[in-house]
Amino acid sequence: MSVSNLLENWAQVRHEHPNNDKPHDPYKWAMAIDLDACTGCNACSIACYAENNIPVVGKERFQHGQQMHWMRVERYWDEDGREFPDQGFQFLPMMCQQCEAAPCETVCPVAATNHTADGLNSQIYNRCIGSRYCSANCPFKVRYFNWYDYPTDEMVWPAEMQQQMNPDVSVRSKGVMEKCTFCVQRLSAAKVKAKGEGRIVAEGEVQTACQQACPTSAISFGNLVNPDSRVHKQWAAQQVELDKDKQAKNEEEEASELRGYRILEELRAYPSVMYLERVRESAV
Amino acid sequence: MYRFLRFPILLVGLFLAASSFAANSSQPALTTEDSLGPQVQQPIEFPHNRHAGLKDASDPAKGGMEINCQYCHTYARRSAVAGIPPLQKCIGCHQNIESVRNKPRIVELFKYWDAKKAVPWKKVHDLPDFVRFNHERHIKRFVEQQDRPVQEACGYCHGDVKEMTVARRQKSLAMGWCASCHEKDHPVVAEGGTPIAGQAYWYSFQKPAAAVDANTKARGPNDCWQCHK
């Protein structure tokens, strides 16, 4: 949704799944993360830092809740009575879910975050005034605020580190909100290449940084409307539909063997990330 | 009472009426806003008019050479940035042009060549780092798909370079100026019903069921992430 469209149709926005009137075509970027394959190694998080010029804030600021990791790996302990060395746990990589009806978009006073035609939730740093309302309204808590200008004097990057900065991603300044972009710079480069050749982006042509770094291929990313894409096949196999707030498979009497689910689906944010995990007795 | 206010109120009213009329009138013509950039001092005063300008029929020694913009700015059609031609490109022609070999600017040029140093050209059209602009897409659309003259297509943003010596920014290159084009309704098919390649192609993706005729209009991409990074 463009800014002009957003402003014209302010009253109508987000009352129902926006797909109903404007189908995603030819792109809808989506993700599927297999938690049974995730080992919690944090490679995705590191890859994200490197790709997106994310500042490393240090231990002290991290404790103050000023961390900037767009991709974080959450850890959930199993509550089965066993003590620490034997206690089981589950990892969950959490990043912006690129909600179709994103709660952050409707509350931004300056429309700095809004929806693109590809179904991404865009964040425009220049437009952002730092009200942090979007972060307050995000059910996944995946938006990060720049409390400082990085690099600061006391936390200046070594000169050679400048060489590893990604020129395709802005370095954000103090007072703006930022979040996972699904590596939009890579998407945009792939789209330009495909457009020049008169086709759409093929499956496997574009990868996000986290997906590329994942040693167990737990993360798959692609175009959900392309029936050949891995992510489309996974969503279809797990019977998870993008524009539903209650999946039909969950209504069945018998507990479904299917592993796919989306986080906080009932909030009607329609996230674009599906997680796969077998429900275990110990984790319930 | 308040008689002295009559005239100012009339003036304000007239102004409001005129400005609201202006706001409602038809969309502004493409690329009209002129905003002259700073005069950039280049290491060698490169005469664009001599290279790209029109030929002088009466005296071939004067006038321009009508060289295609893309002969030197060769990256524009195949990459995001137009780039600056390497010194090799200048020398490639100029080593065979004996008649101007001793002109001061050419002597200067060969000094760089002999020293094996690149000419430190300065940027004239410098977009902020948070913007991505793709030259290739614009050349593909205007020159390759719509067959418009190269100088016209480049001129939408760069002005009439064939009249300049050292290039100077002619348009504001601000976001509103870009959007004045991107938010315009452009026809999807040309006169006679031939689809305008790229536009009709993408229109068919977005509205597969819609019938396309001469009145069908579409807009250029205008979501924020198209240009902001």
Image: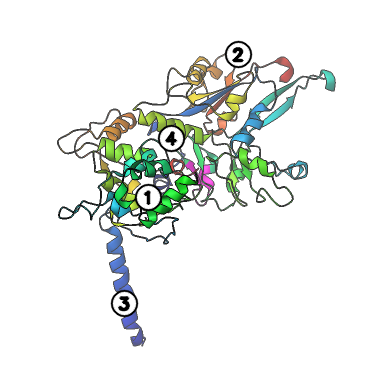
Q: Is residue B84 left or right of residue A161?
A: left
| Amino acid at the residue labelled 1 | Cys
Front position among marks 3 and 2: 3
Residue designated by label 2: A255
Magenta span covers which residues? A105-114
* Discs 3 and 2 carry the same chain letter: no
Q: Is residue B63 left or right of residue A95?
A: left
Residue drawn 26% across and 58% down?
B25
Residue designated by label 4: A18
Q: Nearer the viewer, residue A104 or B110?
A: B110
Residue B37 percent coordinates (x, y): 40, 60
Dot 4: element? helix
Residue designated by label 3: B11
User: In the rendered structure, the residue with mark 4 lies on which chain?
Assistant: A
Q: Which tag, 1 or 3, sits closer to the chain's start? A: 3
- Asked if residue B114 lies in the magenta stretch, the reply is no
Dot 3: element? helix
Tell me how far mark 4 sits from mark 1, CA to CA. Answer: 28 Å
Tell me how far mark 1 sits from mark 3, CA to CA. Answer: 34 Å
Residue density around tag 4, few if under 14, some if 14–19, many if 20 or more, within 10 Å: some
Dot 2: element? loop
Front position among marks 4 and 1: 1
Front position among marks 1 and 3: 1
| Amino acid at the residue labelled 2 | Ala
Residue designated by label 1: B178
